[in-house]
Amino acid sequence: MKPVSPTAAHRAFRDELIALLRRNDDLSALEMLAVASHLVGQLVALQDQRALTPGEAMEIVAANIEAGNRSALDGILDTKGRA
């Protein structure tokens, strides 16, 4: 599946989700991962299967997990000499 470039609306939605996670810092990273994964599972189940098969939905999920990992690692590796 071909990746889609994020729009301004996509970035704004992601930023809101990150802000929500930061407001709930009483949860561990593992708990946040578990809850977010559960929500993703629900979103996959709610897709219109006439337009998108469960397999296609999971391809989108996997591709975006990889993109998120790359983005996080790029942010860590791009310290420009600051540790």
Image (cartoon, rainbow, N blue to C red):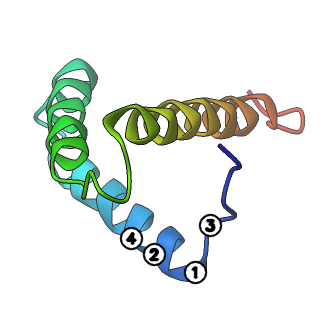
SS of the residue under disc 1 = helix
* Rendering coords of residue 52 (x, y %): 38, 51
Which amino acid type corresponds to the residue marked 3 in the rendered image?
Answer: Pro
Q: Earlier in the sequence, mark 2 or mark 3?
A: 3
Quarter of image, res 23: bottom left
SS of the residue under disc 2 = helix
Q: CA distance from mark 4 to mark 2?
A: 4 Å
Task: Single out the residue that lies furthest toward the top.
Answer: 30
- Residue 28 in sight here: no
* Residue designated by label 3: 6
* Residue designated by label 2: 12
How would you rate the neighbour count of disc 1 (Cα within 10 Å): few for under 14, some for 14-19, many for 20 or more?
few
Q: CA distance from mark 2 to mark 1?
A: 6 Å
* Residue designated by label 4: 13
Task: Single out the residue that lies furthest toward the front.
Answer: 50
Quarter of image, res 54: top left
Q: Nearer the viewer, mark 2 or mark 3?
A: 3
* Rendering coords of residue 61 (x, y %): 44, 37
Task: Single out the residue that lies furthest toward the bottom.
Answer: 8
Label total for image = 4
Q: CA distance from mark 2 to mark 3?
A: 10 Å
- Residue 66 in sight here: yes
SS of the residue under disc 4 = helix
